[in-house]
Amino acid sequence: MSVSATDRIYRVQVSPRPGLANGTALLDDIRALGITGVTQIHRSELYFLRGQLTDAEVQLLCTELLADPIAQEAIWAPIDRVPPAPEGVSLIEVGLLPGVTDSVAQNLLARASLVGVQGLSAASTARSYALEGNVSEADLRTIAERLLSNPVIEYYALGYLRPHVGDGHVSGPLRAEVVSVRGLTEDELVALSRDRLLSCDLKEMQAIQAYFYREGRDPTDVELESLAQTWSEHCVHKTFKALVDYVEVDEQGVEHHETIDGLIRRYLRAATQEIAAPWVLSAFVDNAGILAFGDRHEVSFKVETHNHPSALEPFGGANTGVGGVVRDVMGVSARPIANTDVLCFGPLDLDAQQLPTSVLHPQRIYAGVVAGVEDYGNKMGIPTVNGAIYFDEGYTANPLVYCGCVGLAPRGSHPREARPGDLVVVLGGRTGRDGLHGATFSSLELTDTTGAVTGGAVQIGNPITEKIVLDALLVARDERLYTAVTDCGAGGLSSAVSEMGAEIGVSVDLARVPLKYEGLQPWEIWLSEAQERMVVAVPPANLARLQEICTLYGVELTVIGEFTDTGRLQLAYADQPVADLAMSFLHDGLPRRHLHGEWRQTPPAPLELPADLPHRLKELALSILAHPNVRSKEDVVRRYDHEVQGATRVKPFVGLCADGPSDAAVLQPLDVPGQLGVALGNGFCPEVGKLDPYAMAISAIDEAVRNVVAVGADPERIAILDNFCWGNPALPDRMGGLVRACKGCYDGALHYGTPFVSGKDSLNNEYLDTVTGRQVAIPPSLLISALGLVPDTDCVVTMDLKAPGDALYLLGATHRELGGSMLAQAFHLSGGTPPGCAAEGPAVARALHRAISSGLVAACHDLSEGGLLVSAAEMALGGRLGLEVDLAVMPAAAEEQLSPGERLFAESNGRYLVEVAAEHAVAFEALLAGLPAARIGTVVATPTVNVSLGAETPLLSLALSEIESAWRGHIDA
Amino acid sequence: MPSAVAAVKPRIIILHAPGTNRDREAAVACELAGGRPEIVHIHQLSAGERRLGDYQMLLIPGGFSYGDDLGAGRLWANDLYHRFRGDLDQFVLAGKPVLGICNGFQALVKAGYLPGPAPEQRVTLTVNQRGRFECRWVRLRAVEDSVCLFTRGLPEDILCPVAHGEGRFWVDDAQQQAALRSLRLVALRYVKAEVVDDVRREVPVAPVAGYPANPNGSYDDIAGICNAAGNVFGLMPHPEDHVYAWQHLRYTRGERGGLGLGLFENGVRAAAQF
């Protein structure tokens, strides 16, 4: 049913019945804006129906589809006959901009004929807020703009919304445009790159210019865009492959010069090659790293970031971030079995006055990002089992959204070889104008006009579309119907198809690509980052069977071209050739970047502890437990389904009341026979990174390893992933820090024998406020994600204390390392020595693993943010048991003469607290012989954690009730 | 004769719609319970490649059918009602067991099969009282006098996770509320457990669950209901996610029991009669 000029438009408003409405959360948010006049707010859903409809048909749609007869009521009217809103009520109505994915409307349109309504030609959805109370128009606009709508994807009205429903899309003639590059001056080349958002520098533009001189013609816009996308930082990691001139000035002021032949090659890949673990099946090559899992399976792991989109449209940005990394795992022919997410925001209580221009408030970013992660993961049926949430003012303008996904596949089921003659087949979502320039956009710094300029860069996901593609793809995989597969991520079809055909050649007709709406230019079709699309290479003989599978699952399949043996990327739009590029130039023509890095190593500034610290230990302990970076994240984590697929053996929260924070999750996939498990953990220490990115990398690797070892992973079977979020690498100090971090990655990985199997970088996380001229960079942020193999899941251990009378051991040495610690943050102290490499860390981990495998360990928790005391308090809370701890005997070098504060709060690496039943104490101590380990306490039934320094000197005493209250974010005055 | 029938494992059809995602665990549970499950896409039913009548038990599993667009389970209910009503009515009237879990429960309620008779919708499952999706373990107790065949004779409370945003069982009409009781259609309730200090174990206490034991604000702590004949049963929690001892949320504390398997075994036993 197509739209016609004689269509009528109806407005349907669906509201919850009395008793079921709940607007209190919104009211709180409005008050937080400083607007106090609103007494009530009621939300209802709006549907705009367009077509040749009778009253009875509109009523039928309401009854059958739009309103729940028990919980909701619907009122409707033709749009020109809607009665005025009642007196004393102010309306704010919010709709989606044209072209933004509206899956509800799509489902409604597809359903109407089934319920017997043939005349519905278009539909759209919106929402209406009715506000009561005394509220000015200015207040209404503030509420609408700051709270209820986002101009990147939505528009709003005060009063009734004028709907966009079935409106046509305006477009000019559809053709490729020839862009003159020959004869342009250097300045003109730079201007061309800027005006077209190509993100290419002068040398790259000159390489393009030279290529087309050789070809004897000018490029089309399709070719120019293809090159810019393929050469974008996001897709090709220019910085990590660049030649780097690095100078490090040591503490004595001596300069050490070094030329680094690419950070990935010199540090990350080098570590993997030197470790040469036979169980690494694929590292850095595929869309995800792949590891052996038993004899007949393999697990894959990938972590991505989606920072820039999440800054502009938090829900959509995070939503498609999850969708994207899940597709990466689908792109290695695996079934996703777990998601992870690490999220970084500005402080939630940030004064709105301090907010840079056009930056969304951290509270709003946080709410949107969490909802976006929840929506995609839950709807895909993938358990979200591990992550972290981190707050720092440095993330206010540049929030970080790290999304990870683990996949499982039968061994060897991922084919990688498209052959000439194979068809280029697109599966899944249709292509629209969404996400244009995402790959190049992610390489730009954000400014206060970025939202307006690159609105197209923001995408909205539809997880169900991706779920059905997954369902179909796994059947196709098992029947071996395709010879290669990859996902459409950044760069869209351009990236996916030209990568698959890089070694052979490919020819595509862009006019065949199915579109969401008409009017896309050829380059837009090629570059669109519309979500939920996969590309497979299919031998023609298999096409019919693949079509059958896709029909069953309701997946759209389109043949758009074929792989060739020409060595060229050849694109047409119907009968018009629009691109013809040598694959060799496309993939290898990028001039290598040459960057400069500097690092000035200074001796750690002394960290002056407050003189009255000995009297404030308890207050400090509670304030650290309640710190946003330490306290329970249960209110967020429970919004993620961590149980779907039935494999979550160690859950995010453990213990008697299921509120103790797990070090890592353990998954035991139901379809893998035996007792094999996967442990997932992460290390993230930006506070240390502010002091020294090298120490940050060492600490992050140590923490990620500790996490998975603590639950039972074999320390000799841990693979790690690196995800760097950094500032502008063209600035030598940022680049110098990046080099330091990579050196730390190399040393840390070799120290623990943990190979890197995948990595990604998100650079230029800086914000230029064009009003104040201030340039803001994020803290150097390296996420290390660890995947450890658990050889026998019957031995897994959780962190909650189990029984009174058990012994508590501290493993690993404590040093005077308070730099970047929670203690330093709590007192706003700068300086201090950051945690160094734990020399005995690997030996301790191996011994601990032997103890866990032998069933000697009742509980184990690693020491991270907040140090020993926080870990002990969390273990006690988890088991609802108390502890008697004596710090006089903790493993530490005697000459360091650690103070009580340092013993309690130092954040040295390589440490664990371990609970051991009395009958296992001898065997446990024998395993740890010769390593830094000491029995420091005993589990008691009394619900109190008492810490002393020798029998005579009590240091502090925390009741479980105080711990719980602080840990949930409340401190009693 | 009965022994010969019992030797053949009853065939269980597990329906799959776009967005269904707990079908594979449901199949594992059915297998462990002695059934022969097959995951069947609704398009296979529509196309006539599979026939409902060829199976002895129907399971409508959890997930986000059609993305929960237009309300959780609404469009799937619409499928049941408009595409499969004839066959489904026959299946239900024959007394064959029908189990709806989470999204499947929502679909059966919105298609009118629960509490039934279809097609009138009499109760609903709506947005959780706290307004958000939640995943947490709950304790479920069978209502002793219920006519439900799935919950009959369960030896102990079931412990298993909920994972939903629209699971608040809601019935506003006093007559309906009374009918649920008089017809003994309430099959499962959320119950609260309390910690007893000396043994460090969770032990059940008397009802009136309250949050979070009743995680969504369901009326009368109702977690699952059945139809008047007792053969159609739906619940919001996920017993299929606790069919192995090691899935227990406090397994590392030595706790065992509370498996959700009994519900499936009862279903399979009933299915074996057909």
Image (spheres, rainbow, N blue to C red):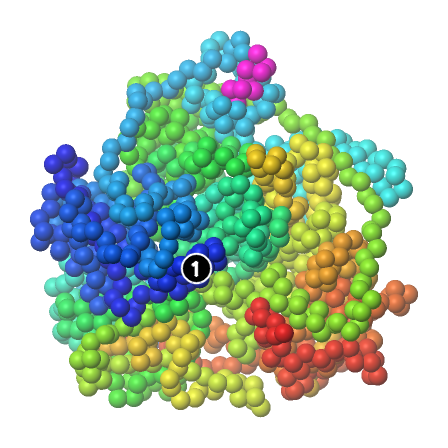
The N terminus of chain A - image quarter: top left
Q: Is residue B60 or residue A394 the one in the foreground?
A: A394
Q: Is residue B48 visible?
A: no
Q: Is residue A226 or residue A89 the one in the foreground?
A: A89
- Residue A630 placement (x, y as % from top left): 62, 64
Q: Which residue is drawn at 50% across and 47% down?
A: A360
Q: Is the magenta stretch mostly helix, strand or loop?
A: helix
Q: Does the magenta stretch include residue A230?
A: no
- Residue A8 placement (x, y as % from top left): 14, 42
Segment colored magenta: A185-193
Q: Residue at x 28, y 28 (%)?
A: A170
**Residue B160 vertical placement versus A311 (above, below):** below
Q: Is residue A186 magenta?
A: yes
**Left or right: A289, with A643 as reference point:** right
**Residue A382 vertical placement versus B220 (above, below):** above
Q: Which chain carries label 1?
A: A
Q: Residue at x 56, y 57 (%)?
A: A349
- Residue B34 placement (x, y as % from top left): 33, 74
Q: Residue at x 15, y 50 (%)?
A: A77
**Callout count:** 1
| Figure quadrant of residue A685 | bottom right
Q: What residue did someone put label 1 on? A: A36
Identity, as a three-letter code, of the amino acid under mark 1: Thr
